[in-house]
Image (cartoon, helix red, strand yellow):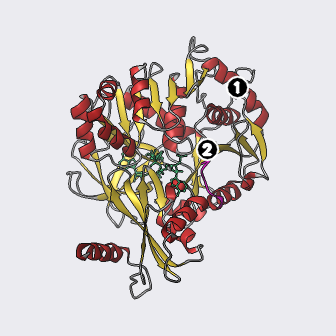
Amino acid sequence: MSPLFPALAGDLPATADRPALRFGAHSLTYGQLAAAAGALAGRIRGADRVAVWATPTLETAVAVVAALLAGVPAVPLNPKSGESELGHIVKDSAPELILTTPGSDLPSTLDQLTRIDVDVHAPGENPPPTDLAPGHPALVVYTSGTTGPPKGAVIPRRAIAATLDALADAWQWTGDDVLVHALPLFHVHGLILGTLGPLRRGGSVRHLGRFDTAGVARELTEGATMLFGVPTMYHRLAEALPGEPALAAALGGARLLVSGSAALPVHDHERITAATGRRVIERYGMTETLMNTSVRADGEPRAGTVGVPLPGVELRLVEEDGTPVAAYDGETVGEIQVRGPNLFTEYLNRPDATAAAFTADGWFRTGDMAVRDPDGYVRIVGRKATDLIKSGGYKIGAGEIENALLEHPAVREAAVTGEPDDDLGERIVAWVVPGEQPHDTLAAELTRHVADRLAPHKRPRTVRFLGSLPRNDMGKIMKRALKDAHEDVAGHG
Ligand code: MCA
Ligand code: AMP
């Protein structure tokens, strides 16, 4: 297939001196990126798979681009992953190499991998054109399910090209755009959309390192045209706006403000529009499908919807029995199924899970429930699985947290639920039956235990101790009853 990054292959005119990437004070032009990524691609070519220690740095971007140039599938790792999560991912994906920033301190879990320190100023050549099949695996991105450890979604080159080009169409996204964001680089949003997206267009990205409203205001004032964020970030912007006129002016001057990874509450949409005169547009995707729908830049913005299917994406709503819903009337709820070139190929080493995810005729079951307006706009109303929690835009399976809690000696039984949270969308709540009377610091200890074994964003924000968990006749924990019981206690307390 044609190159993923025409600007790096010298196929776009006069790009060598154009800015490509900026992370904090460090930046690379297209010429420098082509040299560094070309040099690294030469070193890793032939490897079966490489891991990337995905800190928000130039090194991560260069490593991933190099892997794509070399045709070597890359596995981005969350640098805050705990021992158990990292151990699983490394065992499952079996990378030969780990690409990282010089001087970074890697955990011993990665000791068996050959380490390559990425030199972002390495002299190199414009990489030779690669002729890889569209279905060739590009990335393996780990994503949580309801139970068990995360699964590796194998994302082919075709899906990256298709999704980024569909977004370019929907958003009128060009090489003149300068994107600002602060998203992590080990997930689809920050890596594929937020880093590879600008590079495919021949435009540039400025990464803030970590999210703060002042950084967003500064970059949008100094030439950035687009902002990508999760709803938590837009919520924090909405909270800050009344006291920060410079932020309102900066957001008001942006060409496009895009939110995704979870639903942005209508109240936050409204506060931002009232203060800035601009509307935030939402797009809807998944690790397995990349992007499915979006409100178009030239379309009617409709808060509370995720817009219309992107070019090339087939989308339908189905009943429980798999038959398409009778009407797109804005009221009939069905599960979203999608088909198109944007889809992943498989879950690595999990043919069972892959088979379960698709219908016989190739539709992917998203598990998201939605209604569709007669003119095609999709409104997500919920999720099939109550055991998936979206917190801060991260998808987190209740099962993996329950398993981590059960490994702690003071825990006899555990159940995990999500509760509404103004800032995070949903907050992780752990319900624990302790082995003996819980000591004062047990809640904090369990929180740390989960953060250390899995990842800090998977830690419970609330721990509630109980004498027993409500179970049905089959012994299954009744999570609804947990919530009701708590409301009851809270109501009487
Ligand atoms: C706090 N910390 C701890 C503990 N408590 N560490 C260990 N143990 C503890 N007990 C640390 C954290 O590590 C972190 O460290 C800091 O405290 C703050 O953590 P936290 O409260 O979790 O962060 P936050 O400030 O609340 O983060 C909000 C956020 C973040 C910035 C919005 O949630 C975020 O980046 N979300 C983006 C998720 C995303 O990209 N999802 C896309 C998935 P330190 O200070 O060092 O940071 S892709 C997807 O969904 C699809 C494809 C789509 O549609 O996009
Ligand atoms: P992930 O697996 O982390 O890629 O998360 C994908 C899930 O995020 C989807 O299945 C949806 O439930 C949710 N999601 C993504 N974008 C949106 C959005 N704009 N509105 C509502 N939910 C969203």
- Mark 2 lies on a secondary structure that is strand
226 left or right of 139 in image: left
Q: Quadrant of residue 258?
A: top left
Q: Amino acid at mark 1?
A: Ala
Q: Is residue 173 above or below residue 317?
A: above
Q: Residue at x 70, y 20 (%)?
A: 126
Q: Position of residue 444 (x, y in %)?
A: 50, 65
The quadrant of the image that shows the N terminus is top right
The answer to whether any part of residue 384 appears in the image is no
- Mark 1 lies on a secondary structure that is helix
Q: Depth check: 272 or 241 in front? A: 241
The quadrant of the image that shows the C terminus is bottom left
Instruction: Tell me the residue that label 1 is attached to.
Output: 36
Label 1 CB-ligand 1 distance < 8 A: no
> What residue span does the magenta drawing correspond to?
78-83
Q: Is residue 369 above or below residue 35?
A: below
Q: Residue at x 31, y 30 (%)?
A: 244
Q: Depth check: 456 or 116 in front? A: 456
Q: Amino acid at mark 2?
A: Leu
Of discs 2 and 1, which sits in the foreground? 1
* First in residue order: circle 2 vs circle 1: 1
Q: Is residue 200 magenta?
A: no
Instruction: Tell me the residue that label 2 is attached to.
Output: 139
- Pointers 2 and 1 in contact (C-beta within 8 Å): no
Q: Position of residue 326 (x, y in %)?
A: 24, 58
The answer to whether any part of residue 240 appears in the image is yes
Classified by dominant secondary structure, the portion drawn in magenta counts as loop
User: How crowded is the residue under tag 1: few (<14 C-alpha within 10 Å), some, or many (20+)?
Assistant: many
Q: Quadrant of residue 275?
A: top left
Q: Residue at x 34, y 51 (%)?
A: 316
Q: Position of residue 422 (x, y in %)?
A: 32, 52
